[in-house]
Amino acid sequence: MKKRLATVSLAGCFGCHMSFLDIDERILDLMKLVQFDRSPLNDFKKFKKRCDIGLIEGGCCNEENVHTLREFRKNCDVLVAIGQCAIMGGLPVMRNAIMHAEDPLRECLDTAYLNSPTVFNASNDIPNDPALPLLLDKVYTCAEVVKVDYQIPGCPPSGDTFWLAMTFLLKGTAADLPYELIKYD
Amino acid sequence: MAKTKVIEIEPVSRVEGHGKVSIHLDDHNNVQEARLHIVEFRGFERFIIGRPFWEVPVIVQRLCGICPVSHQLAAAKAMDVIVGAKKLTPTADKIRRLMNYGQIMQSHVLHFFHLCSPDLLFGFDADPEIRNVFGIIKKMPDLAVQGIMMRKYGQEIIRATSGKKIHGTGSVPGGVNKNLSVQERDSFLKEIDQMKKWALGALALAKNYTLEHIDMVREFAAFNSSHLSLVREDGALDLYHGNLRAIDAGGNIIFDQVDYKKFNDYIMEEVRSWSYNKFPFIKSRGHIDGWYRVGPLSRMNTIGFIDTPEAQKALEEFKGLTKGKPNHMSLAYHWARMIEVLHCVEKIEELLTDPDLQGNDLLVKGDRAEEGIGVVEAPRGTLFHHYRVNKDDQVTYCNLIVSSTSNNEAMNRAITKVAHDHISGKPKITEAMLNHVEVAVRAYDPCLSCATHALGQMPLIIEMYDVNGSLLERKGKCL
């Protein structure tokens, strides 16, 4: 019986998904063991069935990220936070505390949409259409929002790290990743 | 807008990053407008302020996990100016170019094989169960393996030149931090003939698809536009360095051989309330008509020639289709992309046999400057980085115009046209119709993480509202 695997990228750069694909030809072996449920690599936009494993890339920076992460928790037996953004917020978290800035998020928005010299902004508004999900006051890690079962560090974890971690996850045994594969870059 | 129905596609899938599409319909289901919303915001341009300048190439490449090298190189080129490195050593210049070719090769291959080929090979309206890379692996394993191995080759080139396949450290202000060892060189040379064979095969696949479906390709998401890219001084394709050239829809020059350090005088970005992605335009033509396209298709339109023989041959065939006039077909991006893959393989071969790659002279510096601008051709188009640095080495200003942002207006026009042609007036909206809209987005290979460098993602939903603004129907694909 193949295990069901779901993946998603929240507030990340997609690098973890790319690194996952760096398992290269081993993906052929992986496909003998898993069945992909929702993932940006296919067109399943909702969960089709309950999943054994959910891989999360990225932290939460808007309400939609939070909603998606909760959906994953609800639908996956084992939830794995992949990479620095999911585990610790990663680079985006730098906007949580900008020195001398009372409202860092506001400053980030002003810089991007009002004050840049190449900006033409007739209304002088920051994008605010209801179609855009609300930004959170700050960037949150996955574990601040839901219970996370495992974390695989790295920016991103290498293809080899993914491969080994997946084999442990699929066997359901405790992971024993060698020192060289654990990076906190 | 309140008095229309809106359908949403969310998330847009098999693209990089997070976005959604909303399609606005009137009472009779006639499409009035379609919008691609980029729903994420990160804020790199602000939070990088205060950081030491040598950190910048490694920080900003984390805008994007698919094209990190492009951001690394654009930032490093800007920082070359800051440290006063007027001309890099031959080793540094060539290592960076090699890295860039590896990057464009792997990104284009990933997009073509892993993300888009299911639409082309199985059909836009194929069963979603097989319409993905896993379906390709199952049904066409040989082709899938080619895609996987070509991407691996590009990724290995990046690892050898940048230290890691994703988010490496190879380019530093003033040069690079390593050369290419003889062992690395030999391992790449061993496989280069195989790569060229597969690149020719992929090119034939993209070309034949275009020619076999030419009536559809001429119509599908096609519209006239201006095009912009870097070109070399002699007009050749150069993905690492050059001057700006823009042409109008008829192929006439708007501006040419403009020093990219003056891009602020030529390009602006309009902010619209419904997307975190801005809408760049050519200043002299104004914000209504000044929009343009970038990326592989645009490059094939702007350049005079390609300086590698096989790719030049392919370019001539490509230009023959439109009798030398600019090609405006969105789906022709795929063909153009595969010409570039072939060009990258040829260039990689040329570089690998160059002894400069084993040189030890890696860094230069000179008089410190306060302002640096770096521009490269990323896989998805022209990428602009602009920084200022104070005397304490801290960044004080950062402005980025990324490739997928430049294609924002074009992508919106593409989905609007497809929605008109395939959804307008239909009583029931199917998953296949929605996938047509996504196929139009995918042609541009948008990198919506980049586009919201302000932090990104891109999923696709369709929501339908009645004339009073209440939600009728909400569809992700495969609900």
Image: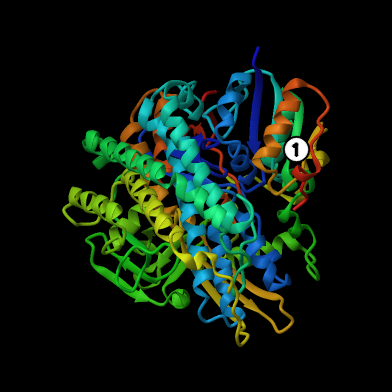
**Residue B190 at least partly seen:** yes
| Residue occupying image coordinates x 48% and y 56% | B405
Position of residue A57 relative to residue B136, above or below, is below
- Callout 1, which amino acid? Ala
Instruction: Quickly name the residue at label 1.
Output: A81
Q: Nearer the viewer, residue B178 or B181?
A: B181
Residue A98 is left or right of residue B116, and the answer is right
- Badge 1 marks a residue whose secondary structure is strand
Quadrant hosting residue B196: top left
Q: Residue A115's x, y, as percent?
A: 60, 71
Q: Residue at x 51, y 26 (%)?
A: B134
Task: Return the chain for callout 1.
Answer: A
Q: Residue furthest top?
A: A1
Q: Residue at x 28, y 35 (%)?
A: B209
Q: Position of residue A164 (x, y in %)?
A: 71, 32
- Where residue B89 appears, as percent x and y from the top left, is 52, 75
Quarter of the C terminus of chain B within the rendering: top right
Q: Would you say B244 lies left or right of B399 here? A: left
Q: Position of residue B110 (x, y in %)?
A: 48, 41
- Which image quadrant for residue B48? bottom right
The answer to which of A23 and B336 lies nearer the viewer is A23
Q: Is residue B455 visible?
A: no
Q: Residues within 10 Å of mark 1 (few under 14, many from 20)?
A: many
The furthest residue to the bottom: B367
* Color encoding of the figure: rainbow
Q: Nearer the viewer, residue A73 or B414?
A: A73
